[in-house]
Amino acid sequence: MATTTELKLSPPLQSIKTQKLISNTNFFHFLSDELIFIILDFLNSNPTDRKSFSLVCKSFYSIESKHRRTLTPLRSDHLPSILTRYPSLTRLDLTLCPRVTDSSLITISNACKSNLQSIDLSRSKYFSGAGLQSLAVNCKNMVEIDLSNATELKDSAAAALAEAKNLERLWLGRCKQITDMGVGCIAVGCRKLKLISLKWCLGVDDLGVELLALKCKDLRSLDLSYLPITDKCLPSIFELPYLEDMVLEGCFGIDDDSLAAFKHGCKSLKKLDISSCHNISHNGLASLTSGRVLEQLVLSHGSPVTLALADSLKRLTMLQSIKLDGCSITYAGLQAIGSWCVSLRELSLSKCPGVTDDGLSSLLTKHKDLRKLDITCCRKITYASIDHITLSCTTLTSLRMESCTLVPREAFVLIGQRCRLLEEIDITDNEIDDEGLKSISRCSELSSLKLGICLNITDEGVSQVGMGCSKLVELDLYRCTGITDSGISAIARGCPGLEMINIAYCKDITDSSLISLSKCSSLNTVESRGCPLITSLGLATIAVGCKQLVKLDIKKCINIDDAGMIPLAHFSQNLRQINLSYTSVTDVGLLSLASISCLQSLTILHLKGLTASGLAAALLACGGLTKVKLQATFKSLLTQALFEHFEARGCLFQWRDKFFRVELDPQCWKLQLEDAIP
Amino acid sequence: MDHKDKVCADTWAKDLRNKTCSDRPKFANFSAPQHQNKWEDPSILDYGIRIEPSFQKLSQPSEDQTSLPHNSNNEKTIADGEDVQMNEIFHASKIQDWDPSTMLTNLSFLEQKIHQLQDLVHLIVGRRGQVLGRPDELVAQQQQLITADLTSIIAQLISTAGSLLPSVKQTLSSTSASAGQFGQLGGSFVSSGAGTEASVKLQMNCGSKLPEQPNQTDPIGNYGTELNYHIEEHESKDEEDADEGENLPPGTYEILQLEKEEILAPHTHFCAICGKGFKRDANLRMHMRGHGDEYKTPAALAKPNKDSSSEPTLIKRYSCPYAGCKRNKDHKKFQPLKTILCVKNHYKRTHCDKSYTCSRCNTKKFSVIADLKTHEKHCGKDKWLCSCGTTFSRKDKLFGHIALFQGHTPAIPLDETKTAVGASEHGEGSEAPNRVGSINFNFGCTLPSAGGLVQNIMDVKESVDDPTSYFSPLNFDTCNFDGFHEFPRPPFEDSESSFSFLMPGSCNYTHKTGGESNSKQVE
C-alpha cells in the first residue's frame, strides 16, 4: 500500500499542487496522517523536497510538522517558534547555529521535554551548566549529547549533565576545563553510558577515567586520546565487559607495562587505536594477543615495525585491519606481516619510509583479500609493487597512492586492467597519463577519483573517465593543467551524480565548463581557484543549476564580479562557505551575498572594490556568519563596537596581512614543490 | 642488663615451676597478671623492659646491630641513609624465603631449650634420689610440666621445618605464617613489619644517643629532632593497620593485656624519689640526673634493655581489654596489637568518648589529642568533597570513597573559582605522595634561621615529652581515612550543615596556608 502511494507521488511535487488546484476536492483528505507519514519516510534524498511538500497546503504543512524527527536550525533566535512548529522532534543538530546560549537550551528543554533524545552542540561554546542542567532535567529521554569543543564548560556543567540518567553517548572532546571531578560526576550519574569521548580533555587523568570504568559497566566505546593517563586506570578499563572500541591515541603515559593488564581482561575489544603512543613496543603489543576478537588495530606513528613487532601480533586471529601510518618499517617486518595466518582486509602503510618493492610483494602474497590499501608517499616503490598489488589484490576497493613518485606511467594501466572493483582511488601527484586514465575508466564502480597535480593527463583521458565511471561522486583535478572545457563537459555529461569537483588552477577552463557542470544538480562543492577565464556568467549558471551548492571557492577568478554574486545570492540558498579573495567583487556583490541565510564562512582577502562601510553593512546583514577571514587593514577602519556586536552574535574574525602574490607558472610551481620536499 | 637477664630467667623459672598444663592460652593468661604486677610496681627500670620488648627483641640477633652504633656517631648519615637502609631491609625481606642463618638461630634456640629441659629433668632425678617418700601428685605435676615443654619444642621444630616449604614453592608471600614467624624470631625483617621495626630500631638508636651526649650543641640536637620526625612518620604509618597483614599463628607469640586504667594513665614512668610522672622512660632518666650523681653515670643513663642478651624471647603482642573487641584476645578473629602505643591509641579511639572537639569546625571530635591536632592542621583545607558531606585532603582518597559507595558523587564547589583552585589542586595532587619528604624539607629550611632553631628545640621537647605527639600528625590523617574506609560511617544526617562548615573553611583556605608553617612549628 505504502509503496504504491509512493510511486504515485514520486513525480515532482509541484505537479501535485497543480493537480490540487484543478480539482476542488482534496484526495489527500482520504489518506490518514499515518499513511502520509510513511510516504514522507521515503522523502530523504533531497532535503528541499520536504520543504516543498510542506508548502503545498496547510494540511501538508501540519503533517510535515508532525512528522519531522530531526532538525538542523540555522539560527538559535528562531528556536521558540520552530520548536512549537515541530512537536515530535527527537534529534536537534545545533551545529549551524552561530551562537547557542543557556537561554536557547532552556527554551529547547521546555519545548521538547522528554521527546528529545539527541542534541548536537559540538560547535558552540557559549552555553554553561545552567542550560545543560535544564536539558538534563527536562529531557528525561536524552540519549545522546555532543558537547565537543565546548571549551568553556566547567566541572559544574559536567555535574549538571550527570542528571541525564539515560544518557548513552557523550562527546566531550576538547572540553579542556573539565577535570576528574566533572568526569566523576558523569560516571556516577550516567550509569547507562555506552560511548564517551574525552579526547583532549586535558584536565582528566587516571582517577576520573578509572571511576568511569568502575561505574559505567555498559561502556562500548571509549576515546581517551591525548589524556595524561598512565597505567593506573587501564586495569579497570580492561575489565569492562562490553568494551569494543578504545582509542588511546597520543597517550604518552601508557607503556608496555600498562598493556600487560590487557592479558587479564577485555575479551570483547574489537578496535584498538594506540597511534602515537611512543612508549609502546613489541613487548607491550604481545599482550594484545589475548584479545581474541580484536579486528582493527591502529599503530600509526608508533614504534618501528620490525620482525619482533610483527611476530608479536601474529596470533591475533580475527584481525582484519591494521594501520601502520608513519611507522618506520623494515623488510623483515613486512615479511612477517605477510606470514600471518589471518587475511587482512585493510592495510595502511602511508608515509612509512621503509616500504620497498620486495617488502610489499612479500606482504601481499598472503593477503589477497585486501579491500583497502594505503601506500601514500611510499616513495621507494616502483612498477614491481603495482604489478604485485594488482595481481594479488584483485578485489581492492580503495587504493590510495598519492606521491608514489617512482611508479612509472605504464604501471597505472595495470590498475584498471586488474582491479575492476575499485571505488576510490587517489593518484594525486603521480606520473599517470591518458593511457592509465583510460584503463582506470574501466572501473565502473569508481566514485572518488583524485588526480591532483597529475601533469601528464589531458582531456582525452578525462573524457574516458566521464564515459566509463558514471557513478563518480568526487573528482579532483587540482592543477591538472592539461584539462580544458572538453574534458569537463565529458565528465558533466557522464557523471550526473557528481557532488564535488576541484578544477583549481586548471587555467584553461572557461565558462563553458561551468555551464556543462551546472547539469550536475547534486554538485555541492565547487573549487575553481585560479581559473582566470571563468566569469560571472559561468558562476550564474552554476548557481541556477546546482541548488545544493554548499561550498564555493572562486579565489583568484579575477573575472568574477558582482554580476555573479547576485544570481548566487538568489539561487544558492544552501551556500555555507565561500572564498572570494582576489576577485573583482565589490560592496554590492557582498551585500547581495548577505541574503544567503546559511552563509557561515566568508573569506574576502584582497577585494579591491571593497570599502569599510560596504563590508560593515554586509556583515551586519549576514546574521549567520561564524567565521570571516579579512584583510588586516579593515581592523582599524571599523569601530570596536561593531566587532563586539559580531562577536556577541558568535562570529569570529581572522585577520590576514598577506602580500598580493603573483600566480606562478604551473610547471615552475611543481618544481618549487619538489624542492620543498626533502 | 643484669636485671633484665634476671627477669627473663625468673620468668622462665617461674613458668617452669608454676605451669601445670600445656595449653597456650592459659600460659598467656598466667603471664598477664604477672606483668600487671610489674606495671604497678614503681620500679621504672622494670617497666622499661616491659614497654619496649620489641626493641629488645629486635636488637639482639640483628646483623645490623654492629653498624648501628657506628652510625649513631654521625646522625646525618642515618637520616640520609635511612631510606637506603630501609630499602635494604625490604630487599632482604623479599629474597628471604629461606635464610640459613635464620635457621641456624632457630636451631640454636631450640638446642638451648632442650638443654634447659635436660637440666630440669636432671634436677628432678636428683631430687627423686634425695626425697623418695614424696606424694604422687608432685610427680604427676612434674611429668606434666616436662610434657608441656616438650610439646612446645616439638611445635617449634615442626614450624622451623615448615619454614623450608615456602622456599621450595618459591612463593614470595613474606607474610606467610611460618616464614614471618621465624623471620622475626631470627631477628631478620619480614616485609609486613619491616617498616615499624626499622624505624623502631632507629628510634632506639636515637634515644640512646640523646642521653649519651646531653651537652651537645643545638644543631645536633636539631638533627636529633629531625631524626625523630623521620621515625615518627615511618612508624605511624603502620601502627594499627600494618599488623593487619601480619599473620602470626596463635601461640607463637605472647599475648599481653593491659587494664583500662593502665592504658588511660597519663604517665607510665614515675620517679622513685619524687614521684613525678613521665610518658617516656628516657625523660625519666634525664630527670633522674637531678637526684644525684649516681644517676649520671653512663650505665644509669643507658637504655636499660639495650643489652643484647643472647636468648631470643617470644614475640610480644597486645590484646585490648575491651570484651568483644576484635583486638581482644577472646575474639574469634583476634588480631593482636603490636605495641603498647598501638594499644593506647586503639583503646582511646575505639572505646573512649571523643572528648576533643576541633575548635575550627566544632564538628569533628577525637579521643586522641594527636588526631585532633592533625585534623586542625587540615580543617577547612580538605577541598575534595563528596556529595555525602565527607571531605578529603586528597583527590585519590575521594575517588576511592566514591568508587566504594553507591550513589556518592564528587561535589563541585558552588563558587566556580576553579581556575585558581584547580591549579593548586594539581600541585597538591602531585605533591601528596611525597608529603613526608616535603615536611622534612620544610624543617631543613627553617633550620638556618634562629627562630626556627628555637622552635625546633621546642619540638624536640614536645616530641619527647608527649607520646600523643609521637606520631606525625600528618600521617594520622591518612590513618583516619583508612579507618573510615574500614568502618563505613553513616553519611551526615544534615548534609547542609556540613556543607556550611565547609564553605567558610574553603574560603579561609588561602588565609590559613599562610600561617600553616608557623603554626606547625609553634605547636
Image (cartoon, coloured by chain):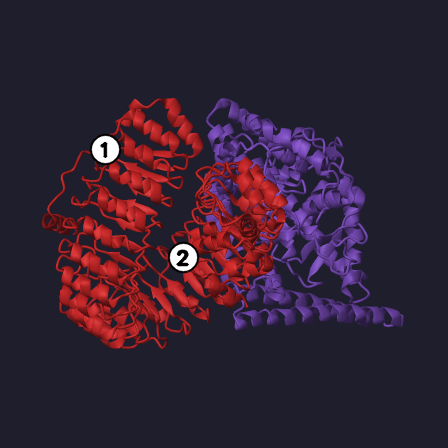
Chain colours: A red, B purple
Number of numbered discs: 2
Foreground residue among B477 and A524:
A524
Q: CA distance from mark 1 to mark 2?
A: 53 Å
Q: Which residue is mark 2?
A: A255
Instruction: Tell me which amino acid carries mark 1.
Output: Leu
Q: What residue sits 81% from the left and 66% below the top?
A: B21
Type of amino acid under label 2: Asp
Q: In x, y percent, where is residue A71?
A: 50, 48
Identify the residue position indicated by label 1 in the image.
A607
Query: Label 2's element?
Result: loop
Element carrying mark 1: loop
Chain letter for the residue marked with disc 1 in the picture: A
User: Where is residue B396 drawn, in percent x and y?
Assistant: 56, 46
Residue A135: x and y, percent?
A: 58, 43
Answer with mark 1 or mark 2, whichever residue precedes in sequence. 2
Specify the subunit that label 2 lies on.
Answer: A
